[in-house]
Image (cartoon, rainbow, N blue to C red):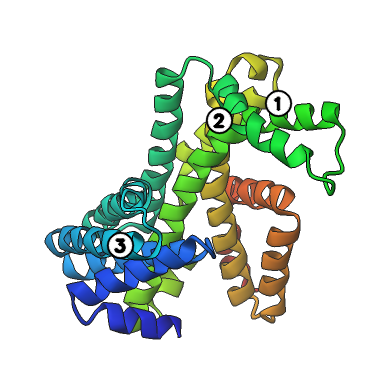
C-alpha cells in the first residue's frame, strides 16, 4: 500500500499535491499520516528537483486549502501545515539532493529544530512561563472532569513540569517530522528507482564526531548544576537526542543485518521504543554518539561476525 502511494504521487505534480493534501488532512485524526505527507514532498523534490518541488508545495497548499475549507470550514489551517511541514521538508530535501548525503540532510533538520529553540528564546523572554499560560487553562479544564485522578497540587506540578519541556518537545517534534519525512521520501525513491539503495545508505549512516561532541557537551551541561540556568541548552537536548536516536537505529539495523539475526530483534526494539520511549530514545542516542568513536559496525565486519 505504501508503495502504491508513492507510485500514484509520482504520476504528476497534481497527483503529488492531492496525495499530500489528503494525507495531511487525515493527519488531523491520525497524526502519523503527517510523516507520509512529508515523505511525498521529499520524494517529489528528490526525484524531480527544486523547481518541481516548489510547484508541488504550492499545488498542495491550494488543494489542502480547498479541502480544509470544504470539510472543516478552516481555510487558514493550510498556513500552519505549510510553515511547519511542507516548506521545512522541501528545504531539507534540497540539502540532501545537493549534498547526496543522508547525514547532511538529517543534521540540517536538527539545525532547524535548534534554530526554532533559539528563536523562541529570543522572542519570548520566559518560554516556560509562556507555556504555563498556554497549558494551564487546558489542564485546569481536564482537572474538572470526574475521571481526572490527580490532585490540584499534582496537576499544578504537571503544568510546571510540562512547561519546562515544551519548547524542546515542540522543536524535536518539528525535526522528527522533517527527518522521518526525508527518510520515507528517500526510501520511496530507492524503492521505485534504485531497489536496495536506501537500506545500504541507512546502514552506513554516520553523523560525525563534531555533532556527537556537541550532543555530549549539552548532555553534560544539562545534568550539571549549571543546567538550571541554561534553559536554552536544555531545550536543544531533545532535538539532538532525536537525531542520534536515528543514528542508533541505523547501528541496530546494520548489526542485525551483519549478524543475520531474526527480524524479531528489530521488532522488539521498535516495540520498546513505543512502550518506554524516553528510556529507549536516550539508550539509542547514546549508542549513536558512541558509534562515532567505536564504530561498532566496522568492528563486526573486521571480526568476520
Disc 1 target residue:
160
Say the numbered circle drawn on residue 235. 2
Q: Could you give the CA–CA distance between mark 3 and mark 2, rounded to whole angstroms?
A: 32 Å
Q: Is residue 211 visible?
A: yes
Residue occupying the point 43% across, 39% down: 113
Residue designated by label 3: 64
Q: Is residue 264 above or below residue 36?
A: below
| Horizontal arrangement in the rendering, residue 262 relative to residue 117 (left or right) | right
Q: Around disc 2, counting alpha carbons within 10 Å, would you say few (fewer than 14), some (14 to 19), or many (20 or more)? A: many
Image location of residue 175, percent across then percent down: 45, 47
Residue mark closest to the camera, 1 vs 2: 1
Residue 162, given in percent of the width and then of the height, sits at 67, 33
Which quadrant: the C terminus?
Answer: bottom right
User: In the image, what residue occupies the spot 49% across and 67% down?
Assistant: 203
Q: Is residue 178 left or right of residue 140?
A: left
Q: Work out whether mark 3 precedes mark 1 in sequence or the reverse, and give the earlier one.
A: 3
Is residue 206 left or right of 64 when viewed as pictured?
right
Foreground: 160 or 3? 160
Mark sitting on residue 287: none
| Mark 1–mark 2 distance (CA, rounded to whole Å) | 15 Å
Which residue is located at x 63 percent, y 73 percent?
256
Q: Earlier in the sequence, mark 3 or mark 2?
A: 3
Amino acid at each position: 500500500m505504501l508503495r502504491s502511494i508513492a507510485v500514484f504521487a509520482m504520476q504528476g505534480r497534481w497527483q503529488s499535491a492531492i496525495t499530500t493534501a489528503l494525507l495531511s488532512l487525515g493527519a488531523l485524526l491520525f497524526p502519523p499520516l503527517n510523516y507520509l505527507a512529508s515523505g511525498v514532498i521529499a520524494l517529489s523534490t528528490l526525484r524531480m528537483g527544486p523547481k518541481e518541488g516548489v510547484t508541488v508545495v504550492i499545488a498542495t497548499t491550494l488543494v489542502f486549502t480547498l479541502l480544509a475549507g470544504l470539510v472543516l470550514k478552516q481555510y487558514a489551517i493550510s498556513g500552519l501545515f505549510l510553515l511547519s511541514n511542507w516548506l521545512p521538508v522541501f528545504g531539507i530535501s534540497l540539502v540532501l539532493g545537493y549534498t547526496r548525503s543522508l547525514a547532511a540532510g538529517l543534521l540540517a533538520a536538527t539545525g532547524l529544530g535548534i534554530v526554532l529553540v533559539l528563536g523562541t528564546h529570543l522572542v519570548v523572554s520566559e518560554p516556560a512561563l509562556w507555556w504555563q499560560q498556554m497549558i494551564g487553562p487546558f489542564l485546569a479544564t481536564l482537572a474538572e472532569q470526574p475521571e481526572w485522578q490527580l490532585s490540584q497540587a499534582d496537576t499544578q506540578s504537571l503544568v510546571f513540569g510540562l512547561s519546562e519541556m515544551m519548547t524542546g518537545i515542540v522543536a524535536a517534534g518539528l525535526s522528527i517530522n522533517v527527518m522521518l519525512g526525508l527518510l520515507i521520501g528517500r526510501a520511496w525513491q530507492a524503492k521505485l528507482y534504485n531497489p536496495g539503495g536506501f537500506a545500504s545508505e541507512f546502514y552506513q549512516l554516520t553523523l560525525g564526531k563534531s555533532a556527537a561532541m556537541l550532543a555530549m557537551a549539552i548532555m553534560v551541561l544539562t545534568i550539571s548544576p549549571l543546567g538550571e540556568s541554561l534553559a536554552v541548552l536544555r531545550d536543544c537536548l531533545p532535538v539532538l537526542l532525536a537525531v542520534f536516536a536515528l543514528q542508533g537505529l541505523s547501528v541496530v539495523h546494520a548489526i542485525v543485518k551483519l549478524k543475520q539475526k531474526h527480524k524479531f530483534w528489530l521488532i522488539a526494539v521498535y516495540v520498546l521504543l513505543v512502550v518506554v520511549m524516553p528510556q529507549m530514545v536516550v539508550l539509542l542516542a547514546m549508542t549513536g554518539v558512541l558509534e562515532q568513536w567505536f564504530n561498532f559496525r566496522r568492528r563486526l565486519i573486521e571480526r568476520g561476525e
